[in-house]
Image (spheres, coloured by chain):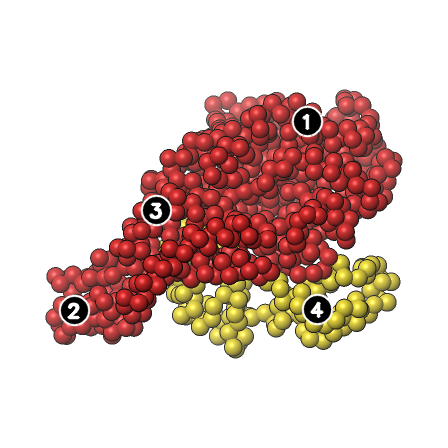
Amino acid sequence: MDKKARNTSGKYKISGRNDLIPLLQEIQAEKGFISQESIKELGELLGISTTRIYGVASFYDGFLFSPKARVHIRICNGSGCYVNRTFSIVDVMAEELKIRPGDKSADGRFSIEMVDCMGACHLGPLIAVNDKYYTIGSERELRQILGRIKKDEQAGI
Amino acid sequence: MSRLAYKYNEGDNRSFLIEEVLANRSDTVSSDVQTVLDKISRINSDIPVISVSFNSGSIISGAGKTYEAVMQYLLDYDVQAGIMKGGWSGATNFDPVVTIRLPGKNNLFFRNIYPEKVESLLNGVLHYEIPTDDFLGQEGTNKFREWPGLSYLSDHPFMKFQKRWLLNEGESYEPADIELYIANGGYKTLVKTLGSYTIEEVCDIIEKSGLRGRSGSGFPTGRKWKYALASDSEIKYLVCNARESDPGAFTDKMLIEGQPHKLLEGIAIASYAMGASKAFIYIQNGADYTISVLKESIKQAYDYGLLGYNIFDSGFGLDIELRIDPGAFVCGEETALIGSLEGRRGMPQVKPPFPSSSGLNNCPTVINNVETLMNVPLIMKNGPEWFSAAGTPGSKGTKVFYLSGKSALKGIIEVEMGTSLRSVIEYTGEGVAGGKGLKALLIGGMSGYLLPERKLDIAIDYEELKKAGAGMGSGGLVVIDENTCLIDLSRYQMEYMQNQSCGKCIPCREGTSRMFEILSGVVKKPPVESSMTTLERFKGVMQLENIASVMKETSLCGLGQNAPNFFLSVLADFRDELEEHIFDRRCRANRCHGLRTFVIDVDKCTGCTLCADKCPVNAIYGTRLQPFFIVEEKCTGCGICYDVCKFDAVSVK
């Protein structure tokens, strides 16, 4: 994050606070998450206190402060998918993976996120495991999928 | 592979399009130019053109694999054909959609073409044998010859009652390809507007057309621009709000994916009319495909000089910056969105001052929705009278909706204002999936309203909907059938609102939490049911209405004011269902798992003890090899016994 280098490369015209969120997004895209060091550097670059930066970043769901889990599960929380559900996907996931939406498991293997409509409503209720999509018809099906994911993940280590 | 990417490349398309088409002031083009245009737009093609519809939804359904399969087929059989990523969007049930145009003939649409179907489809169609199984229809245009004996796409039940101005029936060109957009008449309106209309004239035309904001409130767009124009500030901003703030809808993103250049054209015209030299597109985090399409389109528009400094020598310049929402539902609200653009927390501010007088960086800022802006080029091209001829006296033009939930067909639709909601569900959506009874319709997403089945005959019109106690909202239509529990749905809605409340003002922060707690108590049984818990539940329920009205009156922004809408409409129209949950502790839709109790069929039970072993609360008793029984007072309704029983002996009471 060299101020000079950035300005000469023309990638960013740093004009102060308005650029805070795009810069945070770029850091996240580059490093995968926002570290304490990045916040400090950014604070110096923009002349904003680190507490303020953290205050802004932590307000939004999109910023991560630790690396992403290896298996990232997204559950569609759209109203269209919800009315097609017959059981609580979140509860079953909590039982199987011991985490709830927004959390990451202690070993860094799994994380769950609730997302808005993904645009394929006829496939609902929809979940996405990394980039693979599954239609969850029944509780048994979900448990099977989760079992398979756990196994695959372990084999991948 | 390059042999397949069919493109007209004789000479320089870019300078030809700029000089002969865009810079040409007259409305008509010479026949020579038209011939080249037909070549660029692939109308005048002597080889088949195959297009696989690409949008976020169809990619999930496997459009990418279909595209690869088509490519592979063309290579394997050494067929000369063009292939592209089309922009047709409609019912997601039809995805992946493949469009094939044989030389000089009408486009043919096929549904659900998964990779394994590609070979048989192309084997047939390329030899002029049209399979009927997956056939949707032929597109009716005057450019090509018709296929005798084949049905038209516009006669398909899904399309028949729609008026697709923005979705352009069967648009079969690559959305993010500026050459095709210009060759099909795009950006001509922008250049003409900049060259021959004054700022005030554009505002007048838009005001005269009766275009109203499509994001929910329905404020006249022309008047909004005039407010900003009247301010003497030198810097003004336009923000295109593409932060679809409804988790059940995908309208804005589908619109952008279908015709990104139409949006850019609309933004440019709007910026010119309100005097802005900088525009932002604020788009939702996570919509990766939409963002990539938009980025590419913006780059192309700059390359053609349609954005940037001094556009086509008009003296008007515009910069468009794409901003990605970092993830907050409340940023759909105007002042919160501005906060987020300024690098602050996305928290709503007190209005007034309204953004049109003091918004981003304290400069006048106009915030328009994607759909509103996409209507602008259409109005400028065809005139305000053309636009206001469609619709009702108060609401003009068309409205795009996203149909989902329990409707048989789900996806993006566009209907003329004034169409009745019932006809949208019954004809366009082909009724309720599985032939179930229609119970209600949720209109306007999470902060929307529930319309019971008997009220669905009302027309889609800002005033009519208001009279019925609802609102246009974001364009999400969630069809609810008799198997859906509305109390559970209202708990889910309140949970969402509670999570998304920014926490700035107390009525919203506390109100959503309390309402969620009380509603959770209604759909679940407490661990130990006593007279105290029952009293607490009744007390809570009595307070719900009061909390809702306080939230409506005192919350700072639309999120808090509209959060209780759903519950209030349940209370107004489905009170009996709520009372059944509270007093009888019963869910008629059998959806509230917390309220069900199970019984064991003595004839079927073999006494295997599996259910008793698995029961987390030890509510099942019995002797081995004898029928077991469930103690109703202890049962929490988790349903594990139901799942584990191998003899189907457990059933819901």
Calculate the distance from the C-alpha at mark 3 to the C-alpha at mark 1. 44 Å
Residue B380 x %, y %: 71, 29
Q: Amino acid at mark 2?
A: Phe
Which residue in the protein does label 4 denote? A52
Q: CA distance from mark 3 to mark 2?
A: 38 Å
Q: Where is mark 2, residue-wise?
A: B628
Please identify which colour was used for chain A in the image: yellow
Mark 3 or mark 1: name the one nearer the start of the chain: 1
Which chain does the numbered disc 4 sit on? Answer: A
- Give the image quarter of residue B206: top right
Q: Colour of chain B?
A: red
The residue wearing badge 1 is B208
- Crowding at mark 4 (Cα within 10 Å: few <14, some 14-19, many 20+): some
For marks 1 and 2, give the one nearer the viewer: 1
Question: Label 1 vs label 4: CA separation?
Answer: 46 Å
The reply to whether label 3 and label 4 mark residues of one chain is no
According to the picture, the residue beneath numbered tag 3 turns out to be B575
Q: From mark 1 to mark 2, how far is it between C-alphas?
A: 75 Å
Residue found 48% across the figure and 61% down from its top: B513
- The amino acid type, in three-letter code, at marker 4 is Arg
Pointer 1 and pointer 2 on the same chain? yes
Q: Residue at x 53, y 33 (%)?
A: B463
Q: Is B179 in front, or is A27? A: A27
Image marks 3 and 4: residues in contact by CB distance under 8 Å: no
